[in-house]
Amino acid sequence: MSELQMRVSDDDRERTAGQLQRAFTEGRLTQPEFEDRVGLAFAAKTYADLLALISDLPADQPPPPADDLVVLESTNGHVRRWGEWVVPRRLRISCKYGNVALDLTEAVITHPVVEIELRLKYGSARIVLPEGAGADIDRFSSRHGSAVSRVPGLPRPGAVRVVVSGETGYGHLAVGYPRRGLFGR
């Protein structure tokens, strides 16, 4: 039996559907083509079935590897990350006299759960999550400030879940989705 005749797993079908989704968002497939191919991907039985659906598309580039733990420290400045940056599984940030701004909306996130530990003395943190992500801030405390999450605790299926822990002495934590223009629309 050749490799192409071997039966595929649910993970194989999901990976192919993900590649088709990326091709659709890049404009390589029309909506009807995308819908047809995704339906066939989830019905596929062999690797040959899946290969036929993606053979006319460029090969997927794997995301860059993410470190397990990244430590960021600042004494008198701010810590900011935005745009296309690789999010580690665990991010530990210490900031004595500055603020933290993390925008994950365009970030490369390869883990289903991201843990962010914040150690802030006189600063605040704002974390912007991609639509559908969830956040757990129950392990974060603020002695003379507040901690507010404007997103659900559990993410939609397939979206990232961010767990925030740590503390701030005189600051705030705000977790939310991107603002939507005038009056929040």
Image: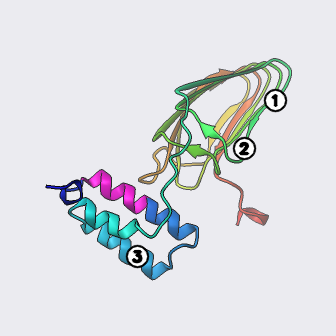
Q: Check the image and tell me how it is coloured.
A: rainbow
Where in the figure is residue 79, as x and y percent of width and height? 77, 30
Where in the figure is residue 179, as x and y percent of width and height? 71, 57
Residue 137: which quarter of the image? top right
Residue that label 2 marks: 82
Q: Residues within 10 Å of mark 2 (few under 14, many from 20)?
A: some
Secondary structure that dominates the magenta span: helix
Which element carries disc 1, helix, strand or loop? loop
Where in the figure is residue 111, as x and y percent of width and height? 48, 39
Kindly give the residue lying farthest to the bottom in the view shown.
32
**Rendered residue at 79%/65% (across/down):** 182
- Nearer to the camera, 137 or 90: 90
Q: Which mark is residue 166?
A: none
- Nearer to the camera, 116 or 165: 116
Residue 118 visible? The answer is no
- Nearer to the camera, 126 or 47: 47
What is the magenta range? 9-18
Up the image or down, 60 lies above or below 69; here it is below
Where in the figure is residue 14, as x and y percent of width and height? 35, 56
Which kind of residue does numbered mark 1 sit on?
A: His
Q: Which mark is residue 35?
A: 3
Is residue 83 covered in magenta?
A: no
**Rendered residue at 67%/47% (across/down):** 84
**Rendered residue at 47%/37% (across/down):** 113
Q: Report the mark closest to the observer, 1 or 3.
A: 3
Residue that label 1 marks: 78
Up the image or down, 81 lies above or below 56; here it is above
